[in-house]
Image (tube, grey):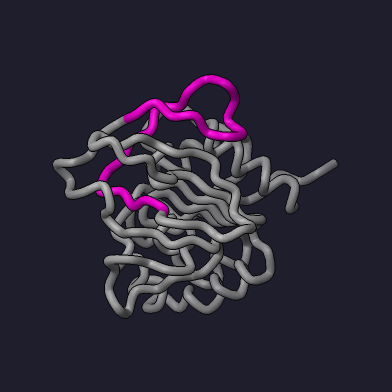
Amino acid sequence: MNRRPIVGVLALQGDVREHARALVACDVDVAEVRTPAQFDGVDALVLPGGESTTMSKLLAFQGLLAPLQERISGGMPVYGSCAGMILLASTILDGRTDQVALGAIDMVVRRNAFGAQVDSFEADIDVTGCGPETLRAVFIRAPWVESVGEQVEVLSRVVTPTGADRIVAVRQGAAMATSFHPELTHDVRVHALFVEMVRQHV
């Protein structure tokens, strides 16, 4: 019998409880990760929405940055929403010069691309792997993906309120990222897609 995966949620800042709730609904064990010791016990990690520069600094301060980079290089499944997407990118546009780019996904991400908090919006989008029905996506000070490498699968795009067509969900190997916040709705299909990746890895 396969054991239940343990999925960690980086709990330094951001939508930690919301991600944990969605993961529990997908029938996995969930652990909050704040220290390297807690990180050692998980099979996969979710990087939540929040503030990417703050999360970047806290990763270094808590001694999590080097272990995270090592686990990602070793193929650990990882998923990032909004700020988490920014952290997983290979290149970050409009970020701070000292901001961490973990390079888990070969993509160029533009930080706060959709605008300020007042420019937040929701849209119904199609997401590959989440079934035929559209998914309600919540964009809050969200990034978008400017370009991707050849090994990156584009899972979803959105037409913005200004009419631009932008990439908002991607996957490469064991890494996945979304511009939007699936944890802020009751639809757990994005988390279920990630959990499927985790089960294949475990």
Look at 39% across and 36% down and name the residue there: 158
Residue 130 covered by magenta stretch: yes
Q: Count how many numbered circles sit on residues in the image.
A: 0
| Part of the protein shown in magenta | 123-145
Look at 37% across and 40% down and name the residue there: 165
Look at 81% across and 44% down and name the residue there: 2
- Farthest residue to the left: give it: 118
Q: Can residue 44 be seen in this view?
A: no
Residue 53 image-quadrant placement: bottom left
| Residue 92 in the image: above or below residue 147 | below
Residue 55 covered by magenta stretch: no
- Residue 178, image x, y percentages: 45, 46
Q: Is residue 10 visible?
A: yes
- Residue 197, image x, y percentages: 67, 46
Residue 129 image-quadrant placement: top right
- Residue 116, image x, y percentages: 17, 49
The foreground one among 135 and 147 is 147
> Which quadrant is home to the N terminus?
top right
- Farthest residue to the top: give it: 133
